[in-house]
Image (cartoon, helix red, strand yellow):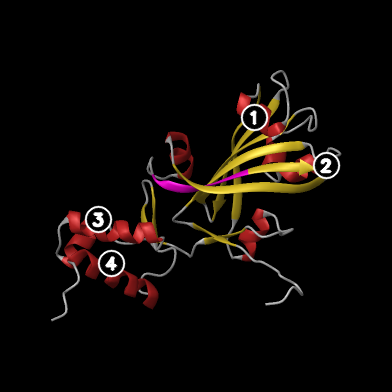
Amino acid sequence: MAKQPQLHSQIKQDIVDKIESGYYPPGSLLPTESEFCKIYDVSRTTLRTALNHLLMEGAIYRKQGKGTFVAKGKVKQILSSSSLRYAEQLKAQGFKPKIKVVDLQKIKPSEKLQTRLGIDAEQMVYQVKRIRYADDEEIQFETAYIRTDLVPEVTEEMANISLYQCISRQGNNIKRTEEQIKIVISDEEIAHHLNITQGTPCFQISTQTFLASEEVVEYSMAYFRGDRVEFFIERDYGQRGK
């Protein structure tokens, strides 16, 4: 005799079925935990287990003080060589992009930054912290460090549009980037800016940006919500065969 699925699994599947049928459409506000408990006649513990599974799978998401919503689909981050800016990638997927600068200042570089940027301890750098949104939802928190000797001016207005545009317009020819991706545990700052619980895993992409002269002009660390972002890689093998 087949084993009956656990109650929280049944509840989870019923919510998934209602999302897929359009009963709970993308972007819609779901019932509260109390309302769900009455609908399914279960304890709050059982209900939360079902909802937590849906949260981890990215089917739903929470907004602090507003409730739980049906996800509109994950944001696709293209890692392949592409001339499309991140904002353009979001627009192409039907999302409304927005950037918020939360910190902009000149700082003395740490030993790590000196190594990453190829500078000495006395060379000041711009520190720019930004949050990227898709449809008013936080999906990425980034801290970028830019050499002041190569980029004398960085303003909040510039950072709200494009840092690469800001770098290029000051006489710099960006040639390439080197990126490293890994999973990290969110600390207090990351969790705060991404509106997630501290300790939640997220993607980290560290990037070094090189000029045509092979000087590193920028080093950044971007943190992406794992429940709202997926990565896409395209490889073109040309005529090298199948």
Residue 113 disc label: 1
Alpha carbons under labels 1 and 4: distance apart: 46 Å
Tags 1 and 4 touching, CB below 8 Å: no
Which badge, 2 or 1, comes first in the chain's sequence? 1
Give coordinates of residue 183: x percent, y percent: 48, 48
**Over which residues does the magenta segment extend?**
200-206
In this picture, residue 218 sits left or right of residue 203: right
Q: Secondary structure at mark 4?
A: helix
State whether residue 27 appears in this view. yes
**Distance from label 2 to label 4 (Cα)?**
51 Å
* Residue at the disc numbered 3: 48
User: Which residue shows up at 18% across the image and 66% down it?
Assistant: 7
Residue 164 in the figure: left or right of residue 9: right
Q: Position of residue 21 (x, y in %)?
A: 37, 78
Mark 4 lies on residue: 12
Q: Quadrant of residue 95?
A: bottom right
Going from the N terminus, do you reach mark 1 or mark 4 first? 4
- Could you tell me which secondary element the residue under label 1 belongs to? helix
* Spatial separation of the CA atoms under disc 4 and disc 3: 10 Å
Look at the picture and state if 172 lies above or below 82.
above
Rendered position, 95 above or below 157: below
Q: Nearer the viewer, mark 3 or mark 1?
A: 1
10 Å neighbourhood of mark 3: few (<14), some, or many (≥20)? Answer: some
Q: Mark 2, residues whose alpha carbon is within 10 Å: few (<14), some, or many (≥20)? A: few
Q: CA distance from mark 3 to mark 1?
A: 42 Å
Does the rendering let one see residue 69?
no
Majority secondary structure of the magenta segment? Answer: strand
Q: Secondary structure at mark 2?
A: loop
Identify the residue at image location x=19%, y=58%: 46
